[in-house]
Image: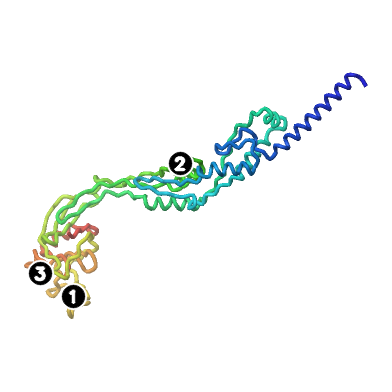
């Protein structure tokens, strides 16, 4: 055997020995996390699975067991890990850390461990949450915080109307909030509470004060205590009239109504009430026996604005709930008040 062949055989045998040693060393490290690896910042390099799980659980338990605080406008809400269905799978994170050391080829793995260079990688701790529970929480927050836009509108008094500008509303983006809460539970922190700002959108009113005069070209207000009816055109007082309102026990109902119907020389549908006596439930046609004279503008139920032959009752509480006017006045008003006109009774 020549000297060159002996050298070659020696080299091959040496490589085989080294390869076997390297393979054996690599196998001994198969259940060990490579040096330099961290799990959500916890150093676990060189540890076996059980030791790594215990260490990660001890150091991350408090950092991951935090409550999420949601700030939405001036309101604050809290969600605990238990109510969010949070679960931490430390074993899976450790398995991922171990697996990260098996990725390069064997030579690289052995060289890395022998030289102590490590992988310098971080594996996120596995956190699972109940998405339905968190979305339900986000919807509850929205239900308490959402505020619809207030459109420009009128406010009313006995003898006045006033345009009021609208107000901007707000709406929480429920799915975005749920996503932020999920992320807050998945991220380790050093505090016991993580604050999340609820994502909100503003909702602008669709109407402005400028358009209210066109929207309400005619408005009526009635002062029960002053026995006056006020007619407004384009939100400016146009004319006032003396009226009679309901007597004690049969008061004209206060509130905001609208003209529902209009009739010329209407029949009187007598309310089925004790005060109507034997006429209760009957219909009295136009004529001298009908107390409703000239015109009728129905507001609600059996209440309306109408003419009366008893003009001496004007300026007092004398009706059975309706608003009485002099026939000449109600005829004039009738022609200038369309169906749908707001009627505010103070």
Q: Earlier in the sequence, mark 1 or mark 3?
A: 1
The residue pinned by badge 1 equals 284
Q: Earlier in the sequence, mark 3 or mark 2?
A: 2
User: Separation of disc 1 and disc 3 at Cα?
Assistant: 15 Å
Mark carried by residue 309: 3
The single residue placed furthest to the left in the displayed view is: 312
**Vertically, is 60 above or below 344?**
above
SS type, badge 2:
loop
SS type, badge 3:
loop
* Residue occupying image coordinates x 70% and y 37%: 29
Question: Where residue 296 sits: x, y (%)?
Answer: 18, 65
According to the image, what is the colour scheme of the structure?
A: rainbow
Quadrant assignment, res 202: top left
The residue pinned by badge 2 equals 191
Question: Where residue 323 sits: x, y (%)?
Answer: 15, 65
- How packed mark 3 is, by other alpha carbons closer than 10 Å (few <14, some 14-19, many 20 or more), is some
Near-viewer residue (255 or 16): 16
Mark carried by residue 146: none
- How packed mark 2 is, by other alpha carbons closer than 10 Å (few <14, some 14-19, many 20 or more), is few
User: Separation of disc 1 and disc 2 at Cα?
Assistant: 80 Å
């Amino acid at each position: 055997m020549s000297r060159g062949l002996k050298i070659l055989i020696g080299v091959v045998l040496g490589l085989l020995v080294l390869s076997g040693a390297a393979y054996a060393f690599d196998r001994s490290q198969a259940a060990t996390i490579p040096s330099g690896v961290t799990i959500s910042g916890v150093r676990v390099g060189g540890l076996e699975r059980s030791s790594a799980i215990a260490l990660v659980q001890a150091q991350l338990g408090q950092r991951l067991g935090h409550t999420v605080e949601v700030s939405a406008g001036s309101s604050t809400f809290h969600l605990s890990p238990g109510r969010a269905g949070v679960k931490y799978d430390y074993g899976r994170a450790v398995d991922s850390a171990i697996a990260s050391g098996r990725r390069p080829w064997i030579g690289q793995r052995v060289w890395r461990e022998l030289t102590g260079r490590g992988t310098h990688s971080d594996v996120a701790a596995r956190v699972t949450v109940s998405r339905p529970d968190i979305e339900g929480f986000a919807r509850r927050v929205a239900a308490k915080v959402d505020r619809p836009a207030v459109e420009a509108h009128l406010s009313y008094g006995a003898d006045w109307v006033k345009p009021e500008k609208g107000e901007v509303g707000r709406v929480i983006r429920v799915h975005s909030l749920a996503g932020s809460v999920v992320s807050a539970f998945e991220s380790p922190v050093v505090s016991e509470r993580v604050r999340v700002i609820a994502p909100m959108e503003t909702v602008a009113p669709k109407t402005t004060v400028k358009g209210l005069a066109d929207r309400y070209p005619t408005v009526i207000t009635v002062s029960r205590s002053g026995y006056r009816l006020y007619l407004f055109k384009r939100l400016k007082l146009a004319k006032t009239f003396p009226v009679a309102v309901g007597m004690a026990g049969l008061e004209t109902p206060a509130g905001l109504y609208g003209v529902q119907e209009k009739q010329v020389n209407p029949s009187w549908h007598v309310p089925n009430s004790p005060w109507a006596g034997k006429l209760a439930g009957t219909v009295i046609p136009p004529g001298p026996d009908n107390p409703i004279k000239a015109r009728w503008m129905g507001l609600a139920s059996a209440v309306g604005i109408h003419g009366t032959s008893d003009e001496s009752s004007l300026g007092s509480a004398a009706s059975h709930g309706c608003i009485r006017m002099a026939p000449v006045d109600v005829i004039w008003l009738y022609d200038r008040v369309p169906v749908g006109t707001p009627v505010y009774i103070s």
